[in-house]
């Protein structure tokens, strides 16, 4: 059973009053007990001193009969329960007991005495507590009655006050419920608390009314904001539909532009490749023509050598037809050996065949380089040694470099990397040709240094030339499409731009450093492990 606020207050106040009353009664009882003991002690001392003074002669003579008679008078007069006289040795001279007083109602006190004659001892007096206990009980009854009256009056006052407070709190509670319903129904609250005055509840009612006014203002603002939001929502839906339609149109345009860009990029890549082919054509033809020329010359010489061998073999066959060659036949063979210089032929035929093989290998290397270069449109990647790609590329551009510069290779022992060989070949071709053209512009013999190394998790390729260098203001524009520092007709401005795109596709970087008048250095960095290989390693791990 749950008590109301009013009854809770009454019960709490009654408990407090009861505890205070119980505490007061306990203190009063303790004080009364102490006071009664003190009074009884004083009375016992007075009776003992009076008895000793009045009966000093009997005490000295130890006249027991007279002492007993006087003790009986004292017991009757003072309503004593016990009267025992002891000498200075503790021996009882007399001991009288009152039969009408129970032991529990006695207060027994031992009081020493002495007379003017020098007689000393003690008197044990049993005083009756009946009078004190009766008086104390009356006081306790009065105190308890007064306490209960006080509790009753305080409870009545508390009930009245709690009733007043509860009535006002009920008004506040009803107002709060009205505000809650107003908030739930989204309508302005109409509640006003009719409490006035200067008390705390009046101040609470004032704050409550201010809250109601604020909620009403907020509700009005929210309602207006809701109307505005609905209007904005309608406009927003219409605007979103327009923007969505426009975005779809722009997306289609962007997709078309992206397709055109890819087509243009492919065309530019093809154009740059054709430009590179144009630059390489004459040199490659010359590079192929030289070994083919001396291979043809060597084959003609080899044909002469074979004819000489055939002539010698014919004479040897004739000589072997007889049982024994005649001296004339030996003389003729010796003459033919000397005439054809067979010793020189035997010495020269080996190097002749070796040189022809080297020439054909040179042609084969150039053809392989051209095949790699022709595969630039392919997206196939394979793990190869960049050092081999550098050597193959140099074989294609050698004719454009060998007359204007010396090529120094500083190729480190590097691991294979996964690349598109054709595209990396195009990048290296651009860098090598640019380096040669930069040196050619100085009209001096220069040097191109090609260095490979492993730098942390990247493979670096550095192409350094001793050309005229690049102006600082041009360095940031080198990789922009159609930007070139070459004279008109010498370049398309696409080589470095396409090279930048190719290296970026490989997850690498390409950068340039230059000092005007001293030369330039282009640095290509390729990852030793591609992103696809990393994903494979992670999945296996």
Image (cartoon, grey):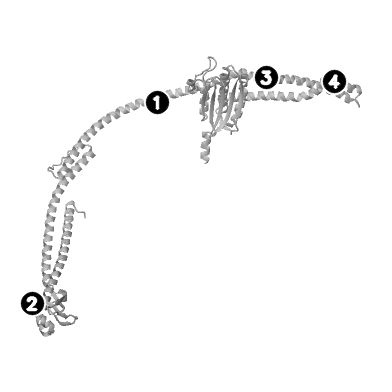
Crowding at label 2, few (<14), some or many (≥20) Cα neighbours within 10 Å? Answer: few
User: In terms of sequence position, does the residue under pointer 4 or pointer 2 come before the other?
Assistant: 2
User: Above or below — where is 448 with respect to 417?
Assistant: above
Crowding at label 1, few (<14), some or many (≥20) Cα neighbours within 10 Å? Answer: few
Q: Position of residue 427 (x, y in %)?
A: 55, 24
* Mark 2 vs mark 1, CA separation in Å: 128 Å
User: In terms of sequence position, does the residue under pointer 4 or pointer 1 come before the other?
Assistant: 1
* Mark 3 vs mark 4, CA separation in Å: 35 Å
Q: Which residue is mark 2?
A: 77
**On the rendered structure, is 290 left or right of 163?**
right
* Mark 4 vs mark 1, CA separation in Å: 93 Å
Quarter of the image where the N terminus is located: bottom left
Q: Which residue is mark 1?
A: 248
Q: Which residue is mark 4?
A: 336
Q: Confirm or deny contact between disc 3 and disc 2 (CB under 8 A).
A: no
Which corner quadrant of the image does residue 174 belong to?
top left
Q: Position of residue 399 (x, y in %)?
A: 63, 20
Q: Position of residue 151 (x, y in %)?
A: 13, 58
Which corner quadrant of the image does residue 349 belong to?
top right
Q: Which residue is mark 3?
A: 290
**On the rendered structure, is 251 left or right of 514?**
left
Q: Is residue 263 visible?
A: no
Residue at 43% in and 24% down: 254
């Amino acid at each position: 059973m749950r008590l109301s606020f009013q009854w809770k207050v009454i019960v709490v106040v009654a408990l407090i009053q009861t505890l205070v009353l119980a505490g007061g009664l306990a203190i009063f009882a303790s004080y009364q007990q102490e006071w009664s003991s003190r009074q009884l002690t004083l009375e016992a001392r007075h009776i003992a001193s009076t008895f000793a003074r009045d009966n000093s002669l009997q005490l000295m003579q130890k006249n027991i009969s007279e002492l007993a008679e006087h003790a009986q008078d004292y017991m009757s007069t003072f309503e004593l329960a016990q009267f025992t006289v002891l000498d200075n040795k503790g021996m009882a001279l007399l001991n009288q007991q009152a039969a009408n007083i129970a032991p529990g109602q006695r207060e027994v006190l031992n009081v020493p005495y002495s007379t003017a004659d020098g007689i000393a001892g003690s008197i044990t007096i049993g005083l009756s507590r009946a009078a004190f206990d009766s008086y104390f009980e009356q006081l306790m009854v009065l105190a308890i009655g007064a306490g209960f009256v006080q509790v009753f009056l305080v409870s009545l006052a508390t009930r009245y006050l709690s009733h007043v407070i509860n009535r006002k709190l009920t008004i506040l509670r009803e107002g709060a419920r009205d505000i809650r319903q107003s908030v739930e129904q989204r309508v302005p609250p109409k509640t006003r608390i009719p409490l006035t005055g200067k008390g705390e509840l009046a101040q609470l009612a004032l704050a409550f009314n201010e809250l109601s006014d604020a909620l009403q203002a907020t509700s009005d603002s929210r309602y207006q904001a809701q109307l505005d939001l609905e209007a904005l929502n309608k406009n927003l839906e219409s605007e979103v539909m327009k923007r969505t339609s426009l975005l779809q149109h722009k997306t289609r345009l962007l997709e078309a532009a992206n397709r055109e860009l890819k087509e243009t990029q492919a065309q530019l890549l093809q154009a740059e490749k054709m430009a590179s082919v144009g630059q390489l054509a004459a040199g490659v033809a010359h590079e192929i023509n030289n070994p083919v020329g001396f291979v043809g010359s060597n084959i003609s010489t080899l044909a002469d050598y074979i004819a000489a061998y055939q002539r010698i073999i014919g004479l040897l066959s004739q000589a072997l037809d007889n049982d024994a060659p005649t001296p004339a036949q030996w003389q003729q063979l010796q003459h033919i050996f000397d005439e054809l210089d067979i010793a020189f032929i035997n010495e020269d035929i080996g190097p002749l065949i070796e040189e022809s093989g080297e020439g054909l290998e040179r042609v084969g290397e150039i053809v392989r380089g051209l095949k790699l270069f022709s595969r630039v449109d392919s997206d196939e990647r394979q793990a190869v040694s960049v050092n081999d790609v550098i050597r193959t590329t140099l074989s294609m551009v050698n004719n454009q470099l060998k007359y204007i510069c010396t090529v120094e290779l500083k190729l480190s022992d590097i691991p294979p990397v996964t690349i598109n060989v054709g595209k990396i070949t195009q990048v290296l071709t651009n860098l090598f040709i640019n380096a040669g053209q930069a040196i050619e512009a100085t009209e001096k013999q220069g040097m191109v240094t090609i260095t490979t190394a492993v730098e942390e998790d990247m493979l670096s390729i550095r192409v350094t030339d001793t050309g005229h260098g690049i102006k600082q203001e041009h360095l940031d524009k080198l990789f922009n499409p159609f930007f070139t520092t070459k004279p008109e007709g010498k370049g398309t401005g696409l080589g470095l731009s396409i090279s930048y795109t190719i290296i970026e596709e490989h997850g690498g970087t390409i950068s340039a450093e230059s000092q005007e008048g001293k030369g330039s250095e282009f640095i290509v960095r390729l990852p030793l492990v591609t992103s696809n290989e990393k994903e494979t390693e992670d999945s296996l791990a």
